[in-house]
């Protein structure tokens, strides 16, 4: 069976190692698999749920495309496009929003985190964000959605909305209920400054994350400054529970090199963090520097990036237009 893959990344700048290891690395693997048809969406409608500078947003859309391509997604094999261009996404979000009960949305933890204390001032867009995400996925009859761990709840909601819409209109299998593809290990990369906080684009300190545009010296410097604890490197798995920074750095190492965490613990057991950090910097530089150089090269060729988006738009629009036409008929328009 052909797997239909759909995922999205917000063009909000500072794409980082968490985005890469949690999502993009997985996109690349899936896109190289002959039995998958992949759609990767730059979700600019999601980006504006919090205020964006228009000029910067435009640059960030291109930078996200450049990051996909530089990481190894072939735009000839996969569809890469930006969400706002395919109007079916906004339309489907509205229609699905009319099937989704507020009670379900009220449970979304990301909204609570992002809205903070002053919920009354958060935009309606930020609140209904997961409905738009469901629309993205369901328009393409997606079977699998590769994402980081933080999107799990939104995917469960997407599944519920698909079933609710099918039920509401007496259908069985019209909207396909998708499966999440979340890596079992290292699906949540933590901040370099706090092993209990997610690595994030919006964290003020740039030292908290490795950006995919960082050069060699920035990577080495950030790893050198990464928070650790005063003990030597852990000697067994159990210790990691109580040592979040050690766990995160070892997890990053394992994920970047595709190696087994237990083997790594054995290899570095009892050594100083400084020794481990030297090796970690090296594997990160080997992995990230070529991507970073390629992103910079691609960003000089805006015409090429815009062509990818135009081509992707045409292909995505064909699929989404058909589905929204059916949805319109089903609801009686
Ligand atoms: P976003 O930048 O919020 O659009 O996220 C793009 C993708 O990266 C999503 O699949 C997220 O789940 C994933 N992601 C973001 N931050 C992290 C992180 N710290 N660890 C793992 N995955 C992440
Ligand atoms: N909400 C996702 C994030 O912030 C991005 C996203 C939007 C997405 N639409 C999607 C991910 C559809 C997967 C499928 O990471």
Image: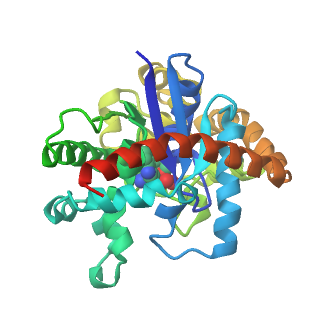
- The reply to whether residue 249 is in sight is no
Which quadrant would the N terminus be assigned to in this image? top left
Depth order, front residue of 163/146: 163
Q: Position of residue 284 (x, y in %)?
A: 66, 37
Residue positioned 68% across, 35% down in the render: 75
- The reply to whether residue 73 is in sight is yes
Depth order, front residue of 300/89: 89
Direction from residue 138 to residue 270 in the image, left or right: right
Depth order, front residue of 165/110: 165
The relative height of residue 164 versus residue 52 in the rendered view (above or below) is above
Q: Position of residue 209 (x, y in %)?
A: 57, 54
Marker count (numbered): 0
The chosen color scheme is rainbow
Residue positioned 37% across, 77% down in the render: 123
Q: Position of residue 161 (x, y in %)?
A: 23, 49
The relative height of residue 150 versus residue 50 in the rendered view (above or below) is above
Which quadrant would the C terminus be assigned to in this image? bottom left
Residue positioned 35% across, 37% down in the render: 240
Direction from residue 294 to residue 106 in the image, left or right: left
Q: Position of residue 22 (x, y in %)?
A: 47, 40
Q: Quadrant of residue 132?
A: bottom left
Depth order, front residue of 190/149: 149
């Amino acid at each position: 069976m052909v797997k239909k893959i759909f995922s999205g990344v917000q063009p909000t700048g500072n794409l980082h190692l968490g985005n890469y290891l949690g999502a993009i690395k997985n996109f690349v693997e899936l896109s190289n698999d002959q039995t998958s048809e992949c759609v990767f969406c730059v979700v600019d409608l999601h980006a504006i749920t919090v205020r964006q500078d228009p000029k910067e947003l435009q640059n960030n859309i291109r930078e996200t495309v450049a990051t996909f391509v530089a990481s190894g997604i072939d735009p000839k094999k996969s569809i890469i496009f930006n969400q706002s261009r395919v109007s079916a996404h906004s339309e489907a979000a509205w229609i699905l929003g009319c099937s989704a009960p507020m009670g379900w949305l009220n449970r979304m933890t990301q909204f609570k985190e992002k809205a903070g204390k002053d919920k009354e001032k958060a935009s309606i867009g930020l609140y209904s964000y997961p409905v738009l995400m469901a629309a993205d996925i369901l328009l393409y009859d997606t079977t699998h959605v590769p994402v980081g761990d933080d999107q799990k709840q939104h995917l469960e909601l997407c599944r519920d909305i698909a079933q609710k819409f099918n039920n509401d209109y007496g259908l069985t299998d019209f909207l396909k209920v998708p499966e999440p593809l979340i890596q079992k290990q290292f699906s949540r990369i933590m901040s370099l400054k706090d092993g209990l906080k997610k690595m994030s684009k919006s964290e003020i300190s740039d030292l908290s994350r490795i950006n995919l545009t960082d050069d060699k010296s920035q990577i080495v410097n950030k790893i050198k400054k990464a928070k650790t604890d005063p003990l030597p490197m852990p000697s067994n798995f159990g210790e990691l529970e109580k040592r979040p920074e050690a766990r995160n750095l070892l997890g990053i190492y394992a994920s970047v090199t595709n190696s087994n965490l237990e083997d790594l613990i054995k290899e570095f057991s009892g050594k100083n963090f400084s020794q481990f950090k030297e090796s970690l910097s090296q594997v990160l530089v080997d992995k990230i520097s070529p991507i970073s150089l390629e992103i910079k090269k691609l960003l000089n060729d805006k015409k090429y990036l815009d062509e990818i988006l135009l081509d992707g738009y045409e292909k995505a629009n064909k699929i989404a237009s058909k589905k929204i036409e059916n949805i319109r008929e089903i609801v009686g328009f």
